[in-house]
Image (cartoon, coloured by chain):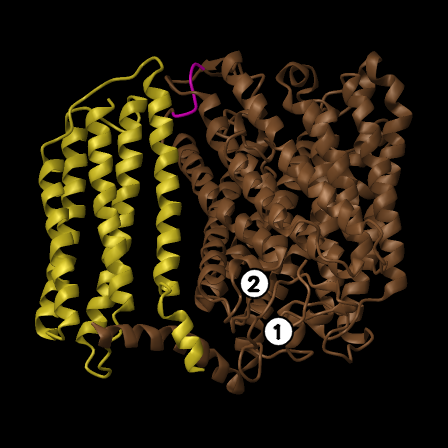
Amino acid sequence: MSTVVMEQRKRIHPHKFTLWVGVASIVMMFAGLTSAYIVKRNQANWVTFDLPVMFWYSTVVIVISSFTLYLSNKAFRQREMAKYRGLVVATLLLGIIFVIMQVVGFNLLWLKGITLTKNVSFSFLYVILGLHALHVIGGVVALVVLFAKAFSSKVRNYNIVPLEVISTYWHFVDALWIYLLIFLLLIR
Amino acid sequence: MSNIATIQEADVHGAHETHHEHHHHETFISKYVFSQDHKMIARQFLITGMIWAIIGGLFSVLFRLQLGYPNSTFPWLEDLLGQWAKGGKLQPEFYYALVTMHGTILVFFVLTAGLSGTFANFLIPLQIGARDMASPMLNMLSYWFFFLASIIMFSSLFVQTGPASGGWTIYPPLSALGDASSGSKIGMDLWLVSMAMFIVSSLLGGLNYISTILNMRTKGMSMTRLPLTIWALFFTAVLGVLSFPVLLSGAILLLFDRNLGTSFFLSDIVVNGKILPNEGGSAILFQHLFWFLGHPEVYIILLPAMGMSSEILSVNSRKPIFGYMAMVGSLFAIAILAFLVWAHHMFVTGLNPLLGAFFVLLTLLIAVPSAIKVFNWLTTLWRANIRFTPAMLFAIGFVSFFISGGLTGIFLGNSALDIHLHDTYFVVAHFHIVMGVASFMGMFAGVYHWFPKMYGRFLNNTLAYIHFWITIVGAYLIFWPMHYEGLAGMPRRYYDFSMWESFKMFTGLNEFISFVSMIVFAAQLLFVFNFFYSIFKGRKVTTQNPWGANTLEWTTPIRPGHGNWPGEIPEVHRGAYDYGKDGREFIPQTEPVGEHESHH
């Protein structure tokens, strides 16, 4: 059986690969939404508006969270488990703060009269960014699971695959946010 | 770092080993209900798909009754359907609901989940030499999401206002406005929720199929040694993973329009004399999002049938498949083109004619890889020592319908002709032949061929031959005349053609089509009987490799347990199609290449 292990050494772990295919799938969903946005923008009744400053702050928060998660990966590899746990908690908190900031951002827009149903350009903003926030919440749930695992004292688990899978996903939703922000700034 | 690499390896390896050991302490629930064994999940998909096929087929018989005998009443219909068939005559609202549900059920629940779900789950690990899927857990979830989608869709049949009735393509505004028709009410909401579950199911399945094929192949199983079934299922999964999310985005926007008052797809609409406040939306936008899934969906349905037919044609011709690499290449070409032709469903939406011309060109280009495949199937059959097993007959039937239906695709792909033929029975005939009947032929071929591996018994051959001949002759008798009706301008979706003078000449023909459809439906019930009877009473399989095939699934025990091979996974030394080589009838993939062996 050792030959089988040799054979599979070069290959990517199936779970990681599965995640990458899943990422491609999520990309297609947002591609569908943003291309619908572009099509609509070229038609009548399109209203342009400014994004709230809150979205800039939330960008900073999610970028920092990617960085702390990167450091936690590093700590895990070096078996500095206390540091690893701290960094996972920091990432988790930053993720929650990001979602709260998005909600606050939505609220600011709403107060300015940019409501869901008033104009189709407003509707698109809420749907696209809302779906992104849902994906971040999915990442937060995954981090909670990881967090629970990190504090479980029963098993000393040094399997890095779950951490790497969740990290890849987290960096992806971070990159997706930056793409969406640039998209909304350039195409309006 | 080396330390970590070892952990990862152990995990990849461990994924195999743990399943291998698990099957000792299985309970009824873990074996038959919440099973993580890919073979059991495949059987669950197949049987659920068959139940749906019976329901969807029965619906078509019911609405064919209306189309064939528009002026007759059937008192038993009222007993069966109650208020939907008052006085023994199908109500127009329910006629549309039946047509919509027939399309939805057959396209998604039978020919997507029932076909890919069954054969991708069953064949991928067995044919690539893996103990199970990359993630058996996600695989199980994939079935249960499908089950949930099924329950929701089934329950929508029983709501007061009826199931969704705006067509399986759920175009707005019919689908976006609850007041538009009775089928636009709760039935439509249930349709959307069910489809969301269905999309989750097919995404989880697709993710698994792709990563299993790319990462879990046994030693020596290079991509170019894969059986064509696996290639086809691979491209099917890629299409699903990349196109279903776009439908999901369309469905989400539609849900917002329906329930939260947005106007993505709605503008300037008057319902019951009242002007709606919705402004700025575009119904055409939905069509783009829908058909970006909708066209790849056609190939999601067709490719597995192509792959299985290729395999079965080669095994039963006792000849190598002609042009293996060309077969893979043409599958790839079809998969790419599938994403670039969606607007050919929209030639009459006011699409810019220049843009239409591009879509015409890309659509007609599909004829090239399709023709390559057809010629390769025919040359595989050419001068072969054919064994006419039921599976082989259905595989040949698949080729026949793929040719007949594919040729009319060339008619419809031309926008100039399509403007005349759009929304007529010509289109109905075309897509029923090329993706409906052809895919069913491939699916039946697959069931007859792999049933011995699934249940350790054979299906009854006599019933199988009766099933085949009634199906192939009946399907042509049903759909061939529809081409003429379509050319004469008879439109789709109409409830009663006897109201138009110009279509009165088709009264007899419509009655004939309806009559044949009932016979063909009865023949399918014969198959269902054969299937369930043979599970328990069929002739037992006594040899490991009853068809004399080369692929790995026939190296497992007759009824493989969870883990597939009791010992080590066999190593692969050659491609899957060494038939009739060097005077030998077949050479299994596990046999090392001999020193003096000739090259093809």
User: Which mark, residue B225?
Assistant: none
Task: Note whether residue B339 is visible.
Answer: yes
Query: Does the image show residue B80?
Result: no
Q: Which mark is residue B590?
A: 1
**Residue shown at the point (76%, 16%) measured from the top left:** B489
In the displayed structure, B598 sits above or below B111; it is: below
User: Going by the image, does A87 lie left or right of A173?
Assistant: left
Q: Nearer the viewer, residue B492 or B440?
A: B440
Within 10 Å of the Cα at label 1, are there few (<14), some (14-19), or many (20+) other Cα atoms?
A: some
The chain assigned the colour brown in the figure is B
Q: Viewer-proximal residue, A159 or B349?
A: A159
Numbered disc 2: what chain?
Answer: B
| Above/below status of A20 relative to B355 | below
Q: Which residues are magenta?
A: B264-268
In the picture shown, does residue B560 fall above or below B367?
A: below
Q: Chain of mark 1?
A: B
Is B265 inside the magenta-drawn segment? yes
Task: Please report contact status of discs 1 and 2: CB closer than 8 Å, yes or no.
Answer: no
As drawn, the label of residue B124 is 2
> Image check: A74 left or right of B289?
left
**Image quarter of the N terminus of chain B:** bottom left
